[in-house]
Image: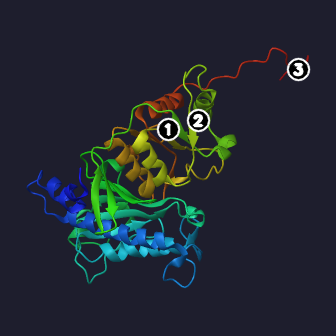
Amino acid sequence: MPLSERQTLTQYLIEQRRRFPGASGELNALLLDVAIACKGIARAVAQGELGADPASANADAGDVNVQGEVQKRLDVISNQMFLRQTEWSGNLAGMASEEMAQPYPIPARYPRGKYLLVFDPLDGSSNLDVNGAVGSIFSILRAPPEVVGAHRDLTEADFLQPGTCQVAAGYALYGPVTMLVLSVGSGVVGFTLDAHIGEFKLTHPNIAVPEDANEFAINTSNSRFWEPPVKRYIDECLAGRSEPRVKDFNMRWIASMVAEAHRILMRGGVFMYPRDTKDPSKPGRLRLLYEANPIGFIMEQAGGRASTGRQNVLGVAPSSLHQRIGLVFGSRNEVERIERYHQEPARKAPAPLFAERSLFRE
């Protein structure tokens, strides 16, 4: 299709709204504001150390966020872009960000809307130093009516909604081209930023994740901390054509969940950052609200699956704003196999034929 005939993001959203005659248009307006914020972040990322900031945009900002991570300057800049671009329009009652300890209520000078925005402003920012792919992740929820009506203040509890309650979710990928991948609950579509006119154009309609795969992504440096079901799955993948998988697998690891998710949407695969024993105080590495839920929503809408390894991640009831969780997502058959391994009884290692023997056994 000629570029001039491709739908813009605005045209796509208008078309979707026509399916719901009673829709107010607030969701469309909010998504367009999010898209503008992503365009600004894309420009800042592309500039790198040539940006207007006299200090390196890739240098550490000197602050530690609520996650205990040292912030990059672009983490802070990206967070501010999301806040400033979306707070004023009257579509939001509040926001929560991976980079902020507390929820962000809409300033009193602006009207309150009926939605909540949750986001990771710059996922994978550790890749900036090596010019690697990074992205932004966002999720939209409905705000409680009493908050919208200003009968009470916004609280953390208002954001603690399971992933099944998401109205829309998506991500922007800042790579060789900037892409916006989006679901409003009726499948998944992808837009590419046309830099000549500054518009997102529909380039990937009806994205679907293949049910089977021969690629997996996991941080193997943590293998000594994995639970037995995860180790079993990876060992089988590494065994390749031998039983039981009867096919060879390739391993990928980009250390940017947006980039990993995008690869899986394009050609299938499975991503794993499972619960492990590395830090018993943390039930997982990834954030439920800012990463797992929106990516899980996208995967499920594209025909894939997202899980903790034990249950569908979208069904998890959040307990705190910055809750961490184990996450497995991608091709449905692979994720379901991993879930099955977690449900099966632990397998005992076979006894060695020649073992050290003693009259005094415990």
- State the mark number for residue 230: 2
Position above or below: 4 against 186: below
| Dot 2 and dot 1 residues touching (CB under 8 Å) | yes
- State the mark number for residue 61: none
| Dot 2 and dot 3 residues touching (CB under 8 Å) | no
Counting other residues with Cα less than 10 Å from the Cα at mark 3, is it few (<14), some (14-19), or many (20 or more)? few
**Quadrant assignment for the C terminus:** top right
The residue furthest top is 353
Seen at 33% across and 62% down, the residue is: 193
Q: Which amino acid is tagged 1? A: Gly
The residue furthest front is 2
Residue 303, by quadrant, is top left
The residue tagged 1 is: 309
Q: Considering the numbered disc 1 on the image, is that residue within a helix, a strand or a loop?
A: loop
Counting other residues with Cα less than 10 Å from the Cα at mark 2, is it few (<14), some (14-19), or many (20 or more)? many
Residue 117, by quadrant, is bottom left
Position above or below: 108 against 317: below
Q: Position of residue 283 (x, y in %)?
A: 56, 49
Position above or below: 254 against 234: below
Seen in the image, is 73 located left or right of residue 179?
right
Image colouring: rainbow
Q: CA distance from mark 3 to mark 1?
A: 37 Å
The front one of 37 and 51 is 51
